[in-house]
Image (cartoon, rainbow, N blue to C red):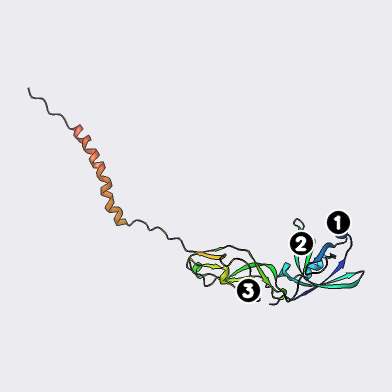
Amino acid sequence: MANEQRELTVQARSGHGKGAARKLRAKGLIPGVVYGGGGEHRSVAVDPRVLRKVMDPARKLNTWYKVTIEDAGKPVGTESVIVIDHQIDKVRDALLHVDFLRVDPERELEVRLPVEITGRAAGVVAGGTLKTFLRYVHASIKPRDIPTSLLVDITPLNAGETLRIKDLSIAGGRILEAGSQALAHIEPAKIKVEEVDDKAKKKDAPKAAAPKAAAAAPKAAAAAPKAPAKK
């Protein structure tokens, strides 16, 4: 599904520094900046609740926005952007700052995509174990073509086989990881050691008992009465 552009309105701001940021947060806003793409840096104030509401729930930070900048309630510009960086309070799970990067709808940009494994590998069905190696990959792709994730179907993978980046493709873009990088591997089932055959145990049993009989012979000889000496 295409990455539909979401609309977001932000406010132009002039204050900078920690003091200005504290005043913004007291009003329920957070500082942000719009930059890149050959344009000037523009400082903005963002309502984090509106940003979360507008954000694509599947793409999250890879959401493509049309940002309208207002000053004193009047629009002063629009920007096509994605979130390139952000700060968050991990304790309260609250956004503290957000950076927007200008993007050209017709040019590729680098994004980080989560890897989503689907299917049940043939090798796993046969008793093997699935091993995965990457949670995210980097890709170069146009804003409208950004997928929610890199979908990896492991169904055909047999025991001992490895799925690598070179085996995959992404519609409308390119995966930037090395082609030799492994994504998934099926480790074959471990072979169980067979128990020794009962017949073999019985065959070996007399050999083990023989030394005991031999060791008992001297004791029997020592216990025999001595013959009386001739006069």
Residue 123 lies, in percent from the top left, at 49, 68
Q: Is residue 69 above or below residue 20?
A: below
Q: Earlier in the sequence, mark 2 or mark 3?
A: 2
Q: SS of the residue at dot 3?
A: loop
Give the mark nearer the N terminus: 2 vs 1.
Answer: 1
Residue 213 position, x and y percent, is 24, 42
Identify residue for label 3.
Answer: 170
Q: Amino acid at mark 1?
A: Gly
Q: CA distance from mark 3 to mark 1?
A: 42 Å
Task: Give the residue drawn at x 24%, y 39%.
Answer: 215
Pick the residue in front: 181 or 189. Answer: 181
Q: Is residue 71 positioned above or below 200 on the image?
A: below
- 177 vs 142, left or right, is left
Left or right relative to 125: residue 17:
right
Q: Does residue 17 appear left or right of residue 189 in this picture? A: right
Point 30% across, 53% down: residue: 201
Mark 1, secondary structure of its residue: helix
Figure check: 171 above or below 131 = below
| Horizontal and vertical percent position of residue 144 | 72, 76
Q: Do the CB atoms of the residues marked 3 and 1 lie less than 8 Å apart?
A: no
- Residue at image mark 2: 86
Nearer the observer: mark 2 or 1; the answer is 1
Q: Secondary structure at mark 2?
A: strand
Q: Quadrant for the C terminus, please.
A: top left
